[in-house]
Amino acid sequence: MPTEDGFTDVADELHARAIVFDDTYLQVAVVSADLFLLDPDLIQAAAERVHAAVGIAAERVFVVPTQNLGAPLAATVPGLPKRDGAYCEYLAEMLASAAIYAARARRPAAVGWRRSEAGPLVCRVDDESGRTAALLAELPVLPARTGRALSADYPGALARFIERQQAELDAVGLLGAAAGAAAPVDEPQAAGERLGALAWAAAQEAT
């Protein structure tokens, strides 16, 4: 069925990535998804589902959109079309499912943090064998634009660079407004790889 904008198909399905930290006293879930904005009630709906399924307190479930301006609207913004109710219901379920899966799959790990001189704040999670199993990178930057279009592939380029460094990584997540960068306008993917390299270097120093 065509949308209000006339689109009839989906080029890339929406995916969410989640990580759960649990020191036996406190459990925190962080979910990252390639979204523009989220209304608080959607985050609350997802958090309540997580609490009902795995017991993590709703106030300790954090949902972080990557600020991808090409994502469907899931927020109430003056001057923009009304959000789609069916899509928002699906979205809350998908975000909750990611956190629930992560909670049920958790295992012993060591966690380290590092901020590089270039800016990325990185969380590195190592498993019991010392292998880096997951990385989270916080990159507060603006959407990458060319003279003709907005790049929605910027976070993908960053994540792919990191994944190539260690093929066994279980997860690479982006936190914050990481849908693009103020970089050479015709090279959003190259810009993503450059920041990917910085994030990977910071991760190697995380303690």
Image (cartoon, rainbow, N blue to C red):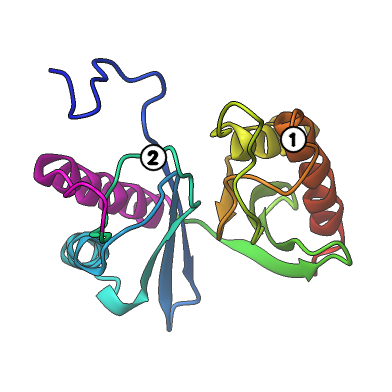
**Numbered marks: total:** 2
Identity, as a three-letter code, of the amino acid under mark 2: Ala
Whole-percent x, y for residue 67 in the image: 48, 52
* Apparent side of residue 152 relative to residue 95 in the rendered image (left or right): right
Q: SS class of the residue under badge 2?
A: loop
From the viewer's side, name the closer residue of 49 and 83.
83
Circle 2 is placed at which residue position?
71
Task: Spot the residue most to the bottom.
Answer: 25
From the viewer's side, name the closer residue of 192 and 149.
149
Q: SS class of the residue under badge 1?
A: loop
Identity of the residue drawn at 65% across and 38% down = 159
- Quadrant containing the N terminus in the rendered view: top left
Whole-percent x, y for residue 59 in the image: 30, 78
Magenta highlight on residue 133: no
**Within 10 angstroms of label 2, few (less than 14), some, or many (20 or more) residues?**
some
Q: Quadrant of residue 193?
A: top right
